[in-house]
Image (tube, grey):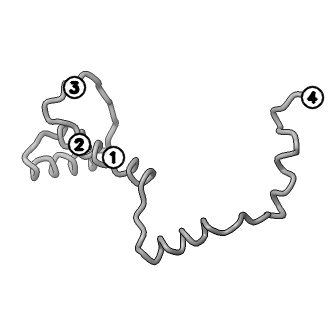
Amino acid sequence: MALPAKRLKTQKFDIRLSEEEEALIREAAKIRRTTPTSFIREQSVLAAETVIHEQIRFVLTEQQWQALDAAFGQPPRVLAGLKGKLAEPDDWDED
């Protein structure tokens, strides 16, 4: 889901960096033959996509899938600590 290279860029995002961080980013951008701004944008978008992807998709081995599928097939357990909690009023409920 990487952004197209020619997408119109209308938003500005300011960040503060230490001198060491700036030097590191400039060196990495130089190695990639791009500008520091482009490097930061591209790497930030990739990192954001990764974080979001990790929240919506996970991968299981066949054995893990079988165990999960078997667990879903079991009847629900009654947890003693939660029993009756839904009947209790919430802190924000007005009396």
Disc 3 marks which amino acid? Lys
The reply to whether the C-beta atoms of the residues labelled 2 and 4 are less than 8 Å apart is no
The residue nearer to you, when weighing 90 against 34, is 90
Residue 75, x across and y down, in percent? 71, 66
Q: Which residue appears at 16% of the width and 51% of the height?
A: 28
Residue assigned mark 3:
9
The residue nearer to you, when weighing 43 against 69, is 69
**Residue projecting furthest to the right:** 95
- Of mark 2 and mark 4, the one earlier in the sequence is 2
The reply to whether the C-beta atoms of the residues labelled 3 and 4 are less than 8 Å apart is no
The residue nearer to you, when weighing 63 against 19, is 63
Residue 13 shown left or right of residue 86 in the figure: left
Q: Identify the image quadrant of residue 92.
A: top right
Disc 4 marks which amino acid? Asp
Mark 1 or 3, closer to the camera: 1
Mark 4 Cα-neighbour bin, 10 Å: few <14, some 14–19, many ≥20? few
Residue assigned mark 2:
2
Q: Which residue appears at 14% of the width and 47% of the height?
A: 29
Vertical side of 31 occupied by 37: above or below: above
Q: Which residue appears at 66% of the width and 69% of the height?
A: 74
Mark 2 or 3, closer to the camera: 2
